[in-house]
Amino acid sequence: MEEVIHIYHTNDLHSHLEHWPSIHKLLAERRRWHEDAGDEVFVFDIGDHMDRWHPLSDGTRGKANCRLLNEAGYDAATIGNNEGITLPFEDLDSMYLEKKFKMLVANLYKPDGSRPSWAQPYHIYISKKGTRVGVIGITVNFARFYEQLGWKLQDPMDELKKCVEELKGHTDIIILLSHLGIHDDELIAGMFPEIDVIIGGHTHHILHEGKEVGFTLLAGAGKYGYYTGHVTLKIDELSKRILHKRAVLYDMNEADKAENEQEISEGYYRAGKQLMAKTVAFLPDELKADPLQHSSLSKMLTEALREWCDADCAFMNAGMLLGGLKSGEVTQFDLLEICPHPINPCTIRLSGAELKEVLLQIRDEKWPHMQIKGLGFRGTVMGVMEYAGIEFEMKSNIQQILLNGMPIDSKKHYVLAIPDMFTFGRFFPEIQRAENKEYWLPEFLRNLLEWKISSIYK
C-alpha cells in the first residue's frame, strides 16, 4: 500500500499580492481534494513573503502578511532577509505573535542565546498513516545585519547539521525549507543525503520539474507569486520508504483565477495607503524628480544622507527617487511611493586617494542610463549622481575635486555616506575592498527623506 503526501509551497512573494487571491484559492481547493482522497497535505512558505515596498506590509510591519498566511492555511514558514533585516527588532519579534502556523528558523537567536518565542528550529508532523515528517527551516546568513538589529544569527550549515542529527531516528522523512539560495541548496543535498526534499528560495530560482541532486529533490517557485509549487511524495506504508518524488509548478497567470482577484489585490493596497496617511509636511511648491536630471528633491535626500550619518560627504544616484512630490500635504505613503527601496544608509572610511578614485569613476558617462536589478533597488536606471559636500571644478584645464570647499588630501581619511547597495554590487572596487563599512539600520532612505522634509517644511 502507498501513502501520498502533497506539499504546496511559495517563496519570495515580496508582497506582490496581485496573484495572492488565486494562490489562496488554489491551496484551499487542493487541500480539500487531497484530504477527501485520504492523502496528507502540507503548505509551506520559504521566506520573503513580506517586502516593505507594499503599503500594507509597511503599514503593519509585516503583521498583515502573517494574517494572509493564516487565512490561506499555511502549516509552516521560514523567514527571508526581507523579514529578518528590514524590520526593527521589536517589529520582527512581534510580527508572528498571532500566527496559526509553525515558524521554523533554526539559525535565529536572541543575543543571550535563547530563541524568539515565535520560532523553533524544526517540527515533526505525524501523518494520518503514522509517517513522521521532520521539517526544518533555515535562513540566509546575513549575520552582521542581524547583529546590528539586536539578533544573533548562527551559521546555517552548523545549525542544519544539529537539526539533522536530532531528527535521525525520530523521523521517516526530512524536508528543508531553505532561504539560502540554489547554490547552497545543491551543496546541502550533497552534504546531507538524509534530507529528502529541499524547498528553496532567496535566489528566485524556477525549477519547473524540480532537480535531483543525489538522493535529494530540490524545488523552487521563482518569485512574486508567479508560480505555486507542488511536491508529491509516494511512500510505502509499511517500510516508510519513499517510492517516488515529483515536483511541478503551477503558473498563476494560467491558473483558475479567484473571483474579483484584481479588486481584492487593489483593496490590500488601499488599506495600506490608509494606514500610511500620516502627514509628514506641507510643501509650498512641487518638488520634481527625474532620474536623468539633477533636482532639488534628489539633492535634498543626498544632503540628508550626509547629515544623518555625520559624514564628510555623500553621493547618491537620482534614480533612487521614482517620482516627485506635489505641493500641499505629504504623507508617509507619498514617501513610500517615491522611495520604496529597502536600502539603508552606509558610511565608509576612505583615504583621500581612494575617495578620489571612486569619485572619478562616478564621472563616467555610463552611470545615468545603467539599468540595475536586485540589491534592493526598486527603480529602473541608476540616474545622474547627486553630491553633498563634493564639488568638481576645472582649474587650468585640470579637473579638481573639492571636499567642503577644500582640495582632497590624498593621505587624509574621510567618511563617505552612500546607499548601501553600492557596497554589494561590483560598482566600486575601493568600496568593495574596504573593511570599515558601517550600515545604519534599521532606517531606510525614505526615513531620512521624511526626517529632512519634516525639518524643512514644519
Image (cartoon, grey):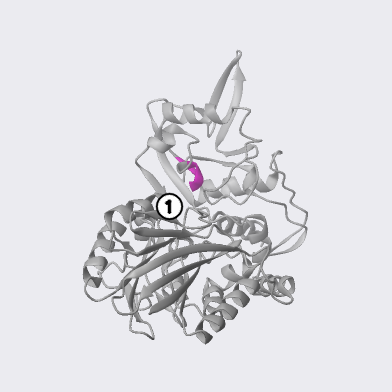
Mark 1 — residue? 182
**How many marks are shown on the rendered structure?**
1
| Position in image of residue 45 (x %, y %) | 48, 69
| Position in image of residue 279 (x %, y %) | 67, 69
Identify the residue shown where x is 28% and y is 66%.
Answer: 111
Identify the residue shown where x is 53% and y is 66%.
Answer: 50
Residue 436 horizontal side relative to residue 169, left or right: right
| Residue stretch in magenta | 416-422
Residue 189 horizontal side relative to residue 75, left or right: left
Residue 419 in sight: no
Quadrant in which the N terminus appears = bottom left
Identify the residue shown where x is 66% and y is 73%.
Answer: 268
> In the image shown, does 443 or 427 lie closer to the viewer?
427
Residue 67 in sight: yes
| Position in image of residue 156 (x %, y %) | 31, 59
> In the image shown, does 167 or 121 lie closer to the viewer?
167
Q: Quadrant of residue 171?
A: bottom left
| Amino acid at the residue labelled 1 | Ile
Is residue 318 positioned above or below 80 on the image? above
Q: Secondary structure at mark 1?
A: helix
Q: Quadrant of residue 153?
A: bottom left
> In the image shown, does 257 or 427 lie closer to the viewer?
257
Residue at the top extreme of this rendering: 396
Q: Quadrant of residue 160?
A: bottom left
> In the image shown, does 309 or 418 lie closer to the viewer?
418
Identify the residue shown where x is 69% and y is 45%.
Answer: 296
Residue 1 horizontal side relative to residue 67, left or right: left
> Is 122 within the magenta?
no
> Is 420 within the magenta?
yes
Quadrant in which the C terminus appears = bottom right
